[in-house]
Amino acid sequence: MSWLASVKFWLLLIPTIPSILCSILILIYFYHQRKRISSHQHLTLVLTLFSFLQLVTDFPFVLVYYHYEEVVPASNQFCLWWNWWDYSLSGLLVFIMAWGSIDRHLLVFHNSIMSTLRKRIIYHILPLLICCTYPLIFYFSVIILNSCENEWDYTTLFCFQPCYLTVQPMLALFDFLINIVLPIIVIILANIVLILRVCWQKRNRQGDAARQRKLALQLLAVASLYIIFWFPLTINGILYTFSGSSELGDLQSTYLLYLPCMVPVLLPFFSVPFLLNFKQVVFNIRPNLIGPLTLIMSRLPPVHA
C-alpha cells in the first residue's frame, strides 16, 4: 500500500466507525420520536438515513480498494453496480441538501405554507421525494442501461469511470453542470441569503428571532460540510472542463474526488447537537427531580410540635 493510499485509508476508516454508531443513535432517536417529528427535522432524518447507507454499503469497498489498491471483486457486474450506487448516493445527498436549503426558507419565513396536509405534500414532501429518486433513475439510465462499452481498470478507484463520461461528452457535461454544479451553487446562495434574511429580521424585530436563528444555524452547520468538501471539486471541475489541463485532471482524480467522502462521515456529528433532548430520548434518561426536591425540603423551617 502506497503512502497516499495508506493516508486515505486511515483518514476514512478512523472516523467512519464512530460515524456509523452515531448514525444508528440518530435513527433510534427518530424512531422514538416518530410521532413528534417536525417538518424541519425531515432534512436531518433523510440525510442521516442515506449517509448511513453510504457508510455501510459503499465505503467498505472504498476502504478495501485503498488497502489493496485494486478493486475487489474485479468484475464487470460489480463495477456497474458500484458506480451506479456511489454516483446515485452522492448525487442524492447533494440534491437533498440543495432542496433542504430552499425548503428552510419556507419553514423559517413562510411557515403558514405548511398549514395543511395538501400544502405540505406539494411544497415539502414531494420535492424531497423527487430529490431522492431522480439521481437513482438518472444514473441507472446512463450507467446500467447505456449502450456504450465500459473499459474498466480494476487498479483504479471505482474501476476508473463509466463509459458515458468519456464517449458521450454532452451527457457528461450535462451530468456535471446539472447534478453537481447547480446544486452546490444552490446550497451556497440559499444559505447566504438565509443568513442575510435572519439578520434583517432580527434587526427589524420581525417574527420569532430565536426560532429563526435556531433553524438557520441547524441548516448552516450541515451546509458548511457540503461547501467545504464539494466546492473545491466543483471549481476545479469547471476549470478542467473548459481548459482540459492535465494538471487539473490529476488534481481532481488524485485528491479532490476524495473530499466528498468526508460529508457522510462527518454529517452525523454535525446533526446531533441540534436534536432536542437527544441523550434523554436515545438512552431513556429521565430528569432527576430528587436532588432539587431534597434541596427545597432542606430549606423549609423545622416543624415544632
Image (tube, helix red, strand yellow):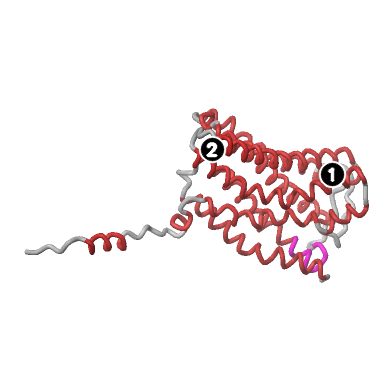
Q: Which residue is drawn at 48% across and 55% down?
A: 278
Between label 2 and label 1, give the one nearer the viewer.
2
- Rendered view: 114 above or below 173: above
- Picture coordinates of residue 265, whole percent (x, y): 66, 57
Residue 238, label in figure: 1
Instruction: Tell me where residue 292 sits by quadrant.
Output: bottom left
Q: Residue at x 74, y 64 (%)?
A: 63
**Near-viewer residue (40 or 124):** 40
Span shown in magenta: 62-71
Residue 202, label in figure: 2
- Picture coordinates of residue 146, whole percent (x, y): 84, 42
Q: Which residue appears farthest toward the left when viewing the image?
A: 305
Q: Can residue 132 be seen in this view?
A: no
Apparent side of residue 74 relative to residue 55 in the rendered image (left or right)? right
Apparent side of residue 243 relative to residue 30 in the rendered image (left or right)? right
How busy is the neighbourhood of tag 2: few (under 14 within 10 Å), some, or many (20 plus)?
some
How busy is the neighbourhood of tag 1: few (under 14 within 10 Å), some, or many (20 plus)?
some
Residue 25, label in figure: none
Q: Label 1 amino acid? A: Ile
Q: Please report whichever mark, 2 or 1, sits nearer to the chain's N-terminal start.
A: 2
Instruction: Tell me where residue 6 sits by quadrant.
Output: bottom right
Q: In which quarter of the image is the C terminus?
A: bottom left
